[in-house]
Image: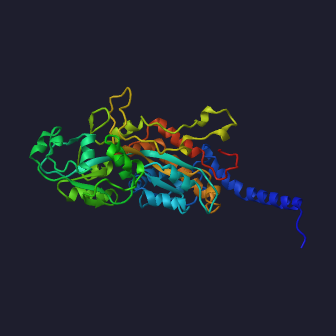
């Protein structure tokens, strides 16, 4: 059989690419023009599935999905979220089995690299989109102490090193005179699952006590320097049970869950040596001091040069931390020290990233949904639910990231 000439092969190759463009370009344009209001919630969407952080699941169901339904009635019910834990979400997105993943902490460089490169599909950068500010209270169960406890960051780190073992330890009594008569042992609790809450808590402890450095920022996921735990809780509900069911217990519990279950919670000393109660406002104040990865806001670029825009959400967020953050400048607000951004991990180029197995209509749902989640109504509703809205500067960074999501890398619309 005669072999085709190079010119013939080039002809067929060009024809194949033209056919792909004709078939997929209409879908791509709908997924790409995210900054164009005429395409927002245009009803041309399909069901999308996310998975990850359990606490984020509560925010999706109670805040973001109602806001999405209100803004996009024609796409109501198309966004589904499974609350199985941060690591499960990352694993499912790495396998391209979900449209996005949710996490209470940013990706490590290794996780980001693994998520962006798949053996089955082509490479796609991944956006780390901050959605809101989450925080963890230090809950305790101590019937012999009716006041709100004050805990220095150093003493809290020593409690979790099992150095301070009793509630009437002189180091605790120094800030809480009423603890002198509480001779109960301290019962330590921790998360059983490898959730972002543990990473955030250990990151906070490491900023005061260098003994925690080997365990901070997920360098040793779910590892602890001691094995002296009386209770292991799964997700936030499990941690609430650890505190509620065991007198003498202490645990790190989501602020919203601690408030909903009326747990005793401590004031924690922040970096400016102020004792601060666990509140959503304290976490939003801490978020205002975040140093974000560099990026160029698209409105700063001349018309026609948007393809050169690399938003901050595509950068390395692994060093972004708002634990033990300074108080905001020029404000009377105090930063609560155990906080983190909650993130959605979203591929930038869907056709390349999913190998053509996911349609532009699914991408349309995801970008419409998170555009609504980052809107003013949804962000305003977060406080009543027990979570912190993003500072305006961070919200704009998140919106910039969503605007750059595209279906085809080589399309010209919206990139």
Among the 4 quarters of the image, the one containing residue 154: top left
Q: Position of residue 180 (x, y in %)?
A: 10, 44
The residue under the point 43% across, 40% down is 390
Work out whether residue 222 or residue 287 is closer to the camera in this orientation and state it: 222
- Asked if 87 appears above or below 375 in the picture, the reply is below
The residue under the point 32% across, 29% down is 332
Residue 22 is left or right of residue 148, and the answer is: right
Q: How is the image coloured?
A: rainbow
Q: Is residue 358 visible?
A: yes
Quadrant that contains the C terminus: top right
Which residue is most to the left?
A: 181
Q: Position of residue 188 (x, y in %)?
A: 24, 54
Residue 116 is left or right of residue 232, and the answer is: right
Work out whether residue 13 or residue 119 is closer to the camera in this orientation and state it: 119
Q: Position of residue 343 (x, y in %)?
A: 46, 49
Among the 4 quarters of the image, the one containing residue 311: top right
Q: Position of residue 203 (x, y in %)?
A: 37, 45
Quadrant that contains the N terminus: bottom right
Query: How many numbered badges does the structure rendering display?
Result: 0
Which residue is most to the bottom?
A: 1
Residue 26 is left or right of residue 99, and the answer is: right
Q: Is residue 80 visible?
A: no
- Asked if 298 appears above or below 185 in the picture, the reply is above
Work out whether residue 147 or residue 185 is closer to the camera in this orientation and state it: 185
Among the 4 quarters of the image, the one containing residue 54: bottom left
Residue 1 is left or right of residue 387, and the answer is: right
The residue under the point 28% across, 33% down is 273
The residue under the point 18% across, 38% down is 175
């Amino acid at each position: 059989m005669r072999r085709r000439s190079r010119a013939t092969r080039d002809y067929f190759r060009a024809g194949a690419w033209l056919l792909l463009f004709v078939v997929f370009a209409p879908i791509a344009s709908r997924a790409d023009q995210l900054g164009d209001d005429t395409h927002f919630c245009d009803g041309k969407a399909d069901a999308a599935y996310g998975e990850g952080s359990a606490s984020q699941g509560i925010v999706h169901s109670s805040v973001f999905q109602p806001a999405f339904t209100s803004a996009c009635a024609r796409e109501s019910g198309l966004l589904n979220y499974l609350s199985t834990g941060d690591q499960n979400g990352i694993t499912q997105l790495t396998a391209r089995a979900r449209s996005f993943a949710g996490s209470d902490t940013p990706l490590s460089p290794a996780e980001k690299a693994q998520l962006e490169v798949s053996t089955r599909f082509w490479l796609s950068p991944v956006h780390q989109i901050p959605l809101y500010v989450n925080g963890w209270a230090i809950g305790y169960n101590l019937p012999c102490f009716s006041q709100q406890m004050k805990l220095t960051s150093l003493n809290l780190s020593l409690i979790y090193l099992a150095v301070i073992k009793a509630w009437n330890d002189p180091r605790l009594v120094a800030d809480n005179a009423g603890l002198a008569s509480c001779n109960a042992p301290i019962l330590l609790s921790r998360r059983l699952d490898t959730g972002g809450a543990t990473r955030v808590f250990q990151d906070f402890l490491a900023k005061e006590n260098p003994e925690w450095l080997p365990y901070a920022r997920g360098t040793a996921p779910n590892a602890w320097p001691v094995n002296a735990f009386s209770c292991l809780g799964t997700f936030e509900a499990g941690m609430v049970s650890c505190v509620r069911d065991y007198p003498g217990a202490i645990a790190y519990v989501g602020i919203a869950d601690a408030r909903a279950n009326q747990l005793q919670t401590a004031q924690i000393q922040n970096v400016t040596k102020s004792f601060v109660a666990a509140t959503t406002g304290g976490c939003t104040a801490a978020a205002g001091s975040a140093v974000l990865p560099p990026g160029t806001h698209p409105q700063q670029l001349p018309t026609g040069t948007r393809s050169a825009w690399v938003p901050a959400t595509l950068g390395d967020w692994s060093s972004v931390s708002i634990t033990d953050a300074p108080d905001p400048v020029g404000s009377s607000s105090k930063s609560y020290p155990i906080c983190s951004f909650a993130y959605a991990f979203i591929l930038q180029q869907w056709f390349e990233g999913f190998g053509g197995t996911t349609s532009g209509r699914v991408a349309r749902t995801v970008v419409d949904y998170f555009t609504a989640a980052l809107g003013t109504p949804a962000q305003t509703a977060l406080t009543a639910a027990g979570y912190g809205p993003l500072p305006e500067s961070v919200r704009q960074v998140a919106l910039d990231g969503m605007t750059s999501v595209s279906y085809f890398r080589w399309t010209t619309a919206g990139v």
